[in-house]
Image: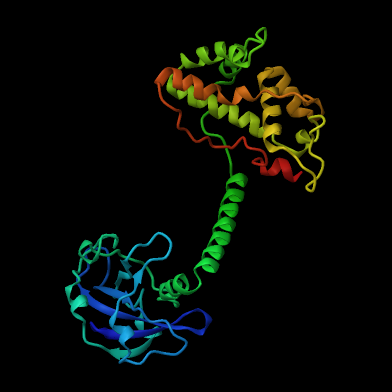
Amino acid sequence: MTVKEGDIFITKLERDFWGAFKVIKIGKSFFEEIDGDLMMLGILDYVDNKKPELDDVRLNQILCCNRFFFSNQYSIDFYTNNPKYNDLSKFEYLGNKPMTEFEKSIDFKLGDGRSGEKGGFPLAGLMESDYGKIAFYEWRWKNEKEEFKKEVEIENEKSRIAREEYRKQSMKPKKMLDDNVFWEVIEKIDWTKEDDQERMEPAIDFLAKKKVTGIKQFQESLTYKLYLLDTKKHAENIGENSFKDDDSYFSVDYFLYVRCCVVANGKEYFESVLKNPKDMPKDMDFEPLLYIAEEAYEKRMYKDLEYETGCDYETFSNYKGWKK
């Protein structure tokens, strides 16, 4: 199919609505690896429950997007004109309409599309069968904003949960500190002191003398050990606040602090509890352990520690541990 500038195509949208898009310009590709010319397409400001007529004035206006984070951003993109990838014959051809003065003024230029027509427009990939659906989204923003926003929030939350579930199933630690060195740091906790900060100070000072990589590796080791203790069986054995069932209240933070107590009491106790969940401490916790790497890093580098571990110590992160 030979495509010309000014050609307008009809596209089917949701709820039996119709939209349209226009070929604004056709030109040589900016990239040698792209086979064929590029076409600049603009989605038109037409949404209706009937197909457009060629003389409809709404076909004279490129859609300007304002939903969510958009701000007067024209819906214009580049696509390869190679029918192997983008075959416009799959869309219904409406006819050819003369270019408006605005369309003539648009430069054939790559950009992000956010700084106006002179800033250029992005290169997109394959055209989907519902190409032009953005016009329907903009229609909803104008006519059903609150309902639309709520639906998007729900879908975003579902996606977040799905990503988090996938992450939990595929967690594995990065490079950790030598285990003997890790427990050497833990042994520096001074249990003769009554104040938690005073108890932790010797361990923090000892760790702060390590290299930055060592501090991060300590955080990795600590996180992984807390992750290993994050199982349903361990949660069922922490005393009065033990996990009972999915319908009963359970403090995820408190269970994390109890796990900290296990690690803070040394290698021998940790390994014993890891194998025997019934040995979990009852009604005891030690939250300060969580911040040892952060405080050591701050003491050494005079700034906050920014480091993402391979595993997560938050309760319910150990996917397999809670499935047993």
Q: Position of residue 116 (x, y in %)?
A: 25, 64
Task: In this rendered view, identify the residue nearer to me: 300 or 61.
Answer: 61
Visual colour scheme: rainbow
Task: In this rendered view, identify the residue nearer to me: 41 or 101.
Answer: 101
Q: Position of residue 120 (x, y in %)?
A: 23, 63
At horizontal 51% and vertical 26% (from top left) the residue drawn is 217
At horizontal 50% and vertical 79% (from top left) the residue drawn is 14
Would you place residue 303 above or below residue 116 in this image? Answer: above
Q: Is residue 119 visible from the viewing direction of this image?
A: yes
Q: Splitting the image into 4 quarters, where does residue 2 fall?
A: bottom left
Q: Position of residue 62 (x, y in %)?
A: 30, 76
Would you place residue 216 above or below residue 30 in this image? Answer: above
Q: Position of residue 147 (x, y in %)?
A: 55, 68
Q: Splitting the image into 4 quarters, where does residue 315 fall?
A: top right
Tell me the quadrant of the picture where the C terminus can be found: top right
| Count of marks, rendered view | 0
Give the residue at the far top of this rendering.
Answer: 192
At horizontal 27% and vertical 79% (from top left) the residue drawn is 23
At horizontal 69% and vertical 35% (from top left) the residue drawn is 230
Would you place residue 131 above or below residue 280 in this image? Answer: below
Task: In this rendered view, identify the residue nearer to me: 246 or 262.
Answer: 246
Tell me the quadrant of the picture where the N terminus can be found: bottom left
Q: Is residue 144 left or right of residue 195?
A: left
Q: Is residue 177 visible from the viewing direction of this image?
A: no
